[in-house]
Image (cartoon, rainbow, N blue to C red):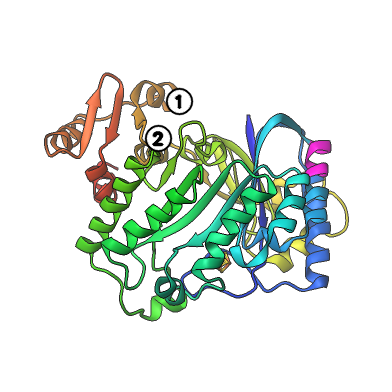
Amino acid sequence: MYGIYIHVPFCIRKCPYCDFYSVASSEDLRRDYLLALRNQILSFDRVSADTVYFGGGTPSLLTPQEIAGIMSLLRERFDIDDGAEVTMECNPATADAAKFRRFLDAGVNRLSLGCQSFQAQTLRSLGRLHSAEEAKEAVRDAREAGFRNISVDLMLGIPFETPDVAERDALTAAELDVQHVSAYLLRICEGTPFAEGVPGIPDDDVQAECYRRFCGVMDASGYRQYEISNFAVPGYESRHNMKYWQCGQWLGFGPGAHMSDSVTRRSFAADIRRFIDAFRDSPVGDPLPLMQYEGTVDAEEYIITSLRTASGLDTAELSRRFGVSLSVDQISLLEKCRDAGLAELADEHIRLTRDGFLVSNSILSELI
Ligand code: SF4
């Protein structure tokens, strides 16, 4: 089964740490984007899909009618499972209960709210448009509108964060009774204002303690960590994101969107003008030549993404899909990790422990 990703490349204002592709919206640009998106979707052959994900950018800047239009086109063009998970990312500054209700009517059944933090100082340091209270209000509004599958996105390792702040954010998410929490460590990306220097970034030890304390609250509140940065009430794991972590299949539409048929990865350039020029006039015959070749899905990628999940690496699946086994050196390294409490090795499964997750970058780079 495929997943379908729609990249909505519009934001009200660029956050100073963000390197996702987005531009300021205007009526004309949005109209041309929606037309090009329609033609791109119509260019693709029919597949069966059980997840749809509107990511960005800020998908909640589209109107509920526009989201409903895209959903109805997807249902016409592809076999979308009746029980499909349909996620929309949403900036808390862009929707209220009435708008959430109309997104629900449009077919969205899972919201991913980009709260980032529930503390005023950390939100200010991230240049977010919403306050801590507005972030909480967005969660309550979404529930009041009828959403029963709500995720909040938070960040760790942000300026002036302390372990107490991380713990308070985790507690607030749990008190808001959301079904899913993502907590990504801030990455300083080249080309962003943060790359030119940002005060108050906690050092590695403080970041590690923030992560441990955050995870501790998630454990105590009934969430299961199923990926290095993701926690869910059992049964509410993101089905769409699991396709990425299991090197599965998904189609990606819009400028900057990636796609994979589980063998080859492709993307469309992160450039809305080129996207509109390529797809404005009519559905093209074969859209794949317009996509950039990004590489082949190989054993290394499978090992890396699997070891980010709590279920870990299935070595029998590695051998079945890619015809390779771990080398003697790789096994020896993993045994050392096991002896240091960083990994667990059992039958045909290898998984990193929480302490292993904390140093996963070095383990994975040595392993690969
Ligand atoms: S709202 Fe989200 S996508 Fe847009 S700039 Fe901020 S972090 Fe990036």
Residues drawn in magenta: 71-77
Ligand 1 appears in which quadrant? bottom right
Q: Foreground residue, 11 or 181?
A: 181
Q: Is residue 158 visible?
A: yes
Q: How many marks?
A: 2
Q: Which numbered disc covers residue 30?
A: none
Q: Foreground residue, 66 or 269?
A: 66
Looking at the figure, which quarter contains the C terminus? top left
Instruction: Report which quarter residue 75 is drawn in.
Output: top right
Judged left or right of residue 344, residue 221 is right
Type of residue at label 1? Answer: Arg
Disc 2 + disc 1, Cβ < 8 Å = yes
Looking at the figure, which quarter contains the N terminus? top right
Mark 1 surroundings: few (<14), some (14-19) or many (≥20) residues within 10 A: few
Instruction: Report which quarter residue 226 is drawn in.
Output: top left
Q: Position of residue 188 (x, y in %)?
A: 39, 68
Question: Which residue corresponds to the image point at 61% horizontal and 75% vertical from the top-left?
Answer: 13
Q: Position of residue 64 (x, y in %)?
A: 78, 55
Residue highlighted by disc 1: 321
Asked whether 76 falls inside the magenta stretch, the response is: yes
Q: Position of residue 14 (x, y in %)?
A: 57, 74
Residue highlighted by disc 2: 299
Residue 193 vs 63, above or below: the answer is below
Asked whether 302 falls inside the magenta stretch, the response is: no
Q: Position of residue 135 (x, y in %)?
A: 54, 63
User: Disc 2 versus disc 1: distance between alpha carbons?
Assistant: 8 Å
Type of residue at label 2? Answer: Ala
Judged left or right of residue 262, residue 94 is right
Judged left or right of residue 178, residue 169 is left
Judged left or right of residue 340, residue 327 is right
